[in-house]
Image (spheres, grey):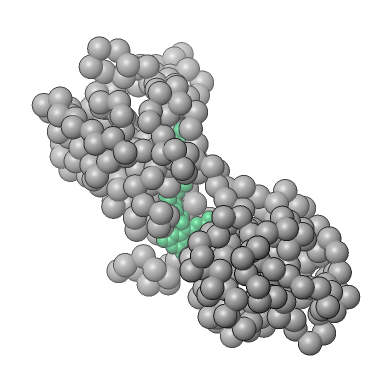
Amino acid sequence: MLETHKADVLVAGQGAAAFAAALYAARYQLSTIIVSESFGGETAIGGLIENYPGTPDIDGFDLMLKFKEQVDNLEVPTISRNLVAVEPDGDRFICTLDGGDIVDAGSVILCVGRERRTLGLPNEEEWTGKGVSYCSTCDAPLYRNKEAAAVVGGGNAATEGAILLARYAKHVYLIYRGDELWRPEPIQLKVLSQVPNIRVLLGTTVTELIGTDLAGLTGIRISRPMDDNETVKIHPEQTEPLNKSREDDHGKDVIDLDGIFIEAGADPRLEVPNMLGLDLNEETGEVHVDRGQRTSVPGIYAAGDLTDGTSLKQTVTAASQGAIAALSAYGYVLAGEHHYEAA
Ligand SMILES: Cc1cc2nc3c(=O)[nH]c(=O)nc-3n(C[C@H](O)[C@H](O)[C@H](O)COP(=O)(O)OP(=O)(O)OC[C@H]3O[C@@H](n4cnc5c(N)ncnc54)[C@H](O)[C@@H]3O)c2cc1C
């Protein structure tokens, strides 16, 4: 039988932003319900987390268990169903969950994160955390003194990732299918051309991930053999050719690697935001929020990777935004406060 629940705040998601939002909302004495069918979000699949303050070297899944335990202690119920629709109804919101249950909520905090773009190759999912990573900011330090790692992608995240990774791994490949890096920041191009241990492979795709389930990734196959005589320019204005080869790279289409970072971008989950007609950031496509994590619709808040609150997409920033969103929801539920600052 379908059920209708009532709450001051509905929190959508079970990642860092959501648990922090629920923790703060419950401590503001707001009746709070979490809805989401999948536990832990990206942090839970991120492997070792070394940069969450106060908990050095913790597995992401265990960190999320701690987040959840703290919320469970405040008796916040979790419904294991995704949010599929939200309709304003006077000053409340009728929230429909997958399967048909309804939550009649005084406010909504959206913490549904992003969908990572993958390469779509066999074993990519299975070897995530075993040599395959989607976050160079997070995992580059794990490659200290490793022989070789690659970054796939041509945007700023990929360029930044390669530069960061080159501080740890001995050899770094930046692999991009286009003939030119995509709208790189000039300062990054300059740095990229100065880092001696990065080799840029343009017009190249990764066609196979090589390894075993036990060892994880040990290498990749690329779409064309490496050519040491080729001049690689990373930007039309750049005159210095950029092709720093490893001694024995020439002619190879298989590269032995300790790890690969797929930095092909991520898409914010916009089904519900679009349904509500929330303002989006024109450049990034993320949900626009102001300093209070307010969206353009009074009573609707958003936090974490879904939003343009910060370009530093991390567990610590997601949690911080969740807490701020709860404070704004508190003001709205108690007194109808919502002073949204547009972009
Ligand atoms: C491989 C990897 C390693 C990482 N390592 C680190 C690290 O070392 N340190 C660090 O600080 N950060 C790291 N990050 C980044 C960090 O994990 C993210 O910034 C953080 O998880 C963002 O939290 P979030 O709550 O915004 O979103 P997410 O963690 O993505 O959570 C989104 C939640 O929403 C749920 N959801 C989706 N759709 C719906 C719906 N319709 N209804 C309800 N729920 C829904 C999802 O199931 C999930 O529970 C890593 C990321 C990756 C991918």
Q: Which residue is drawn at 46% across and 13% down?
A: 1
Q: Foreground: 94 or 285?
A: 285
Residue 46 visible within the image: no
Q: Residue at x 62, y 69 (%)?
A: 238
Q: Position of residue 77 (x, y in %)?
A: 33, 35
> Is residue 41 toward the left or the right of residue 131 in the image?
left
**Quadrant housing residue 163:** bottom right
> Is residue 172 toward the left or the right of residue 79 in the image?
right
Counting the numbered discs, the total is: 0
Q: In this view, does 288 lie above or below 319?
A: above
Q: Is residue 188 above or below residue 114?
A: below
**Quadrant housing residue 224:** bottom right
Q: Where is residue 291 in the image (x, y as percent from the top left)?
A: 24, 45
Q: Where is residue 103 in the image (x, y as percent from the top left)?
A: 35, 21
> Is residue 312 toward the left or the right of residue 222 in the image?
left
Q: Which residue is drawn at 15% across and 25% down?
A: 336
Q: Position of residue 282 (x, y in %)?
A: 44, 38
Residue 307 visible within the image: yes
Q: Foreground: 96 or 207?
A: 207
**Quadrant housing residue 246:** bottom right
Residue located farthest toward the left when viewing the structure as drawn: 335
Q: In this view, does 223 lie above or below 68?
A: below
Q: Foreground: 325 or 227?
A: 227
